[in-house]
Image (spheres, rainbow, N blue to C red):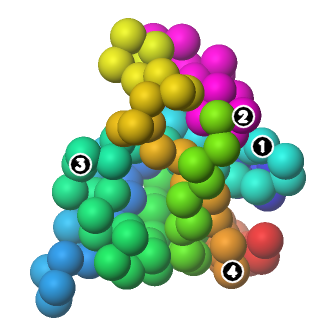
Amino acid sequence: MQEVYEFLKKCETYYLATVEGDQPRVRPFGTVDIFEGKLYIQTGKVKAVSRQIQENPKVELCAYADGKWLRVTGKLVRDDRVEAKKHMLDNYPELQSMYSAEDDNTEVLYFTDATATFYSFTEEPRVIKF
């Protein structure tokens, strides 16, 4: 999982796919954190992506850097603990003007049943489960 985290940090932007009814939705994300041994992302509860994840927690993200790409599939679980939100926001101080660990909007979610696959044109795919 550490390798997945480091790759996503290196990319700075990754793309998260959710489903709304029968329509896929993809948007850029930039937050990633490891807290208590789990891989987390962050969003706002007022956003459509939050509603989509709560209705169907199965997601996939994709990132690309240096001729390699990563796909992570799994389920996202909301963690409403202030400690988890604070950990994320401490790592992204630029978000602290929009989000707070104590507000009702900040949402952090961690992956369960996750499969990360690293790809390139020159190597066989490599799979990590967490």
Residue at position x 40%, y 37% in the image: 104
Labels 4, 3: front one: 3
Is the magenta region chiefly helix, strand or loop? helix
Check disc 4 and report the residue beneath it.
113
Q: Residues within 10 Å of mark 1 (few under 14, many from 20)?
A: some
Task: Tell me how far mark 1 sits from mark 3, CA to CA.
Answer: 23 Å
Q: Locate residue 26 relative to residue 37 in the image: left or right.
A: left
Q: Residues within 10 Å of mark 4 (few under 14, many from 20)?
A: few
**Which mark sits nearer the N-terminus, 4 or 3?**
3
Task: Tell me how far mark 4 sits from mark 3, CA to CA.
Answer: 24 Å
Q: Residues within 10 Å of mark 2 (few under 14, many from 20)?
A: few
Q: Does residue 89 lie above or below 47 as drawn?
A: above
Q: Does residue 80 lie above or below 111 as drawn?
A: above
Among all residues in the image, which is located at the extreme bottom?
22
**Residue 113: quadrant of the picture:** bottom right
Where's residue 68, x and y in %?
Answer: 56, 55
Which kind of residue does numbered mark 4 sit on? Asp
**Residue 128: quadrant of the picture:** bottom right
Task: Verify CB contact (< 8 Å) between mark 4 and mark 2.
Answer: no
Which kind of residue does numbered mark 1 sit on? Phe
92 falls in the magenta region: yes
Residue at position x 54%, y 59% in the image: 78
Q: Locate residue 22 relative to residue 106 in the image: left or right.
A: left
Check disc 1 and report the residue beneath it.
35
- Span shown in magenta: 83-94
Task: Tell me how far mark 3 sits from mark 2, CA to CA.
Answer: 22 Å
Which kind of residue does numbered mark 3 sit on? Lys
Q: Which mark is residue 83?
A: 2
Which kind of residue does numbered mark 2 sit on? Glu
Check disc 3 and report the residue beneath it.
47
Q: Secondary structure at mark 3?
A: loop
